[in-house]
Amino acid sequence: MSPPTHPFLPTGAFSRFRFSFSPWSVALFGVALAVALPILIVLGHVVVPTQGIWEHLASTVLPRYLVNTLWLTVGVGLGTLVLGAGCAWLVVMCRFPGKRVFEWALLLPLAVPTYVIAYAYTDFFQVAGPFQSALRAWFDWQYGDYYFPNIRSLGGAATLITFVLYPYVYLLARASFLEQSVGMLDVGRTLGRGPWRLFFSVALPLSRPALVGGVALALMETLNEFGAVQFFGVDTFTTGIYRTWFGLGEPVAAAQLAACLLSFVIVLVLLEQFSRGKRRYFHASSRYQALPEYALTGPRAVAAALACFVPVFIGFLLPSGILLELALRQGDALLGTRFLRFALNSLGLASIAALIAVALAVVLSYSVRLNDTPAARLFTRVAAMGYAIPGSVVAVGILIPFAWLDSTLNTWLHARYGVIVGLVFSGTAFILVYAYVVRFLAVSFNAVEASLGKVTPSMDAASRTLGHSAGSTLKRVHTPLMRSSLFAAGILVFVDVMKELPATMILRPFNFDTLAVRAHSLASDERLAEASTASLAIVLVGIVPVILLSLAMRRAKPSRDTEK
Amino acid sequence: MKQAPVALAVSAALFSASALADQVNIYSARHYDSDEILYKAFTDETGIEVNVLEGDSDQLIQRMQREGIASPADVMLTVDAGRLWRAEEDGLFQSVDSEVLNERLPETMRHPDGMWFGFSQRARVIFYNPENVDPSEIDTYEALAEPGLEGRVCIRSSNNIYNQSLLASLIEHDGAENAEAWAQGVVNNMARDPEGGDTDQILGVASGECDVAVANHYYYTRLLNSDNDAEREAAERVEILFPNQDDRGTHINVGGAGLVANAQNPENGIRFLEFLASNEAQEILAERNYEFPVVDGVAKDPLLDSWGDFKRDDINMSLLGENNPEAVRIFDRVGWR
């Protein structure tokens, strides 16, 4: 199809925003619109004027929201970058005791939701908790005789969030380090770079897209993190949105705050792209070879092992241990009988949402590949925006249209036939799955897009030349090539859904509780000890996919044996 | 991927609230384990199945408004009078005229038009360390703002509804200006930035972080009855005080419920409300969650009984709701986190 020509416009003026009605582009815009709808509904509130509420917020709490959010972002961003990239480099490039175990164990904190780690550490380290009580008893101190950092603080929140979110960076950094071509490193070595300089001047810059991708995921999780910061009493934008909406009863102002948060994220993304400029990140050779490892010995080996052990310990082992101890001592007696139902609900929702999110991500990224226009790219970006928006805001954005549909339908049926059919649209688990897809599409989309990008376009060309349609090419060429990435994408969404709390709280149907909801309701009733059972269950159920993920990761690793 | 739509349809069918004839649908902002026992007792007695959606009361109100006529809710349960008022303001309740309720509940626990009913009471009280504090120093809420207590008071975040209702009552009794001065005084007296829940404030007194704390009474009872020795010992070092006994009385909040305007099972909803006023339900509330029963003749928990009678602030509960937005703004202005 040749672009339309116009006597007064330069050729190509239309082609930039050309819209061809292939089934793929229709699917692209359909999916993007469906996913973006709740977000757009919330943002639509921005144009509604509010009376004096902004003056009140700006003169009282807004500065605190801003400062806290900023510090939290900076802290978690730096923390996850150092931990994630550092550990990934160690397990990829060095040989030291325990390396094989750390390769996958470093992923385990992914199974621990931020609110769960907050519950566990608070119980353990607070002034009245076992750790400080033991200190006081041991040294015969009174409160005030000694200094102990307060876990319920901005610093505490940033630290704990860092230790459960660094696996996002680790996962992507590790994959990127594994893919680096030996040639690049050899050039670095030939030029006399030692291991440290090699890391900073070659490996890190080359892995920039992966590192940025990982940190961006961690930061977006941080920005819409609710459970832990609320529990710690650290006021951030997200808790502010919640308080403005429900406490002050100002949904419009809350939506405007959400819009601010969103623009903050967009500015971050734009800054990164701007600073990257025209640089591109290719490896000249895609030939994989066993990377030469630095064999560490003596104190260096111990230091490396310790550096990998600390994140696993703080992010996974210690909180699980605290929870286990609490659960055994003062567990949730009622959970036993209902545990299976809660767990099945959690598992069912997470599986369905993961399947759909991956399928949609494939549709989106493949459509962009087929028809790469600025409009298409813009739409996919909009569709992946939900990740940056707090779950409670997404939930209300979904509730507004669906509950309206239900209300309208029932009013009409009632007037006409005198019947009420109840909540057809908003009263089932469908609405929850929808919310999860809106929230987590970005996670699967990023993974799928990256994987699809690695398939050279000549494959498409060859397949199409051989008479296969776009769909058939996707099915027979791309899907098999991307299988492990699709699986990894699905697992990431799965784990995220398992941990999701605010949207689940607002949207779930009758008699429908998940492990996360159970843990939260006990914790909000100040029964941390009893909440430990459900919290531990979330972690346990979450470990299974994380282990699957690490197995997949090992399989996806460029095979060294075959190339020897 | 073909299975996805099928799985979705199946799950939707499984998860949706089934349309059984004999059921009552409850939106509940209560989140206590004793509630399960309560619902089961109701089903055992009446054969009516109970469907529950638990959530934050504001979220539930928001959801009911959106659902309108389609809402499945028959009864809404909540733990704060301000929220009952808000639901009523939004037209979510309908009037109930039940002989059982009129007869069993005292007048103060009934909305004049039967829009909602209170079924249990909780007192927001003061806790102190008897070694460092003379109870006469702190026998009113107002005293918590006195300069003498600088750096010695523990109280939780203003995000909490119980604190919002307490300030709403002070706005009513002392006027908005004095209430703001009070909130400022308490902020000046705080031993630490507000953190944790009510239990943590009581434990703060036990560990020595502060000398005085504000919390609902049943968190203290719960600690005293804890399976955990450390918690029990901590609570035993703390004394309880019912403030304002010489004037208006201690601030009380209610756990209450109303029949939803669009209820599709109104008879079952009323039966559930009546059940909440029964001796059996009142005993469950009193024994399991240590709340004060509101029906005459129902025994209090022995520990609650040992505290004796105390004077309760009989402020019109609706005022707690009306003054709530003002209270939140005052908290924001004085920097009470």
Image (cartoon, grey):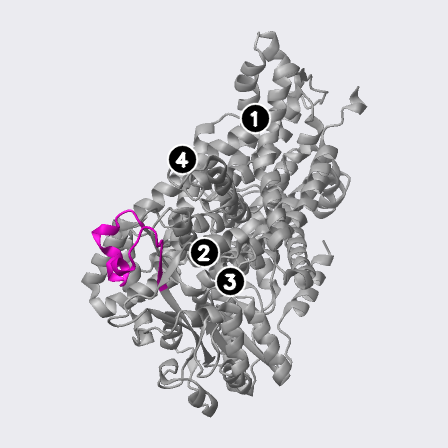
Residue A192 in the image, given as x and y percentages of width and height? 57, 7
Which residue in the protein does label 4 denote?
A146
Which element is circle 1 on? helix
Helix, strand or loop at label 3? It is helix
Q: Amino acid at mark 2?
A: Ala
Asked where in the image residue A43 lies, by quadrant, the reply is: bottom left
- Is label 3 on the same chain as label 4? yes
Residue type pointed to by label 4: Tyr
The dot on residue A506 is 3
- Rounded to the nearest whole Å, what is the CA distance between mark 1 and mark 4? 34 Å
Residue range of the region highlighted in magenta in the rendering? B125-152
Q: Nearer the viewer, mark 2 or mark 1?
A: 2
The residue under label 3 is which amino acid type? Ile
Q: Are marks 4 and 2 in contact (CB under 8 Å)?
A: no
- How far apart are the two marked residues, 3 and 1, measured between alpha carbons? 39 Å
* Mark closer to the chain start, 3 or 4: 4
Q: Earlier in the sequence, mark 3 or mark 1?
A: 1
Camera-nearest label, 1 or 4:
4
Residue in the foreground of this view, choosing between A147 and A213: A147
Tag 2 residue = B235
Magenta stretch: includes residue A406: no
Q: Residue at x 64, y 39 (%)?
A: A108
Chain of the residue on which disc 3 is drawn: A
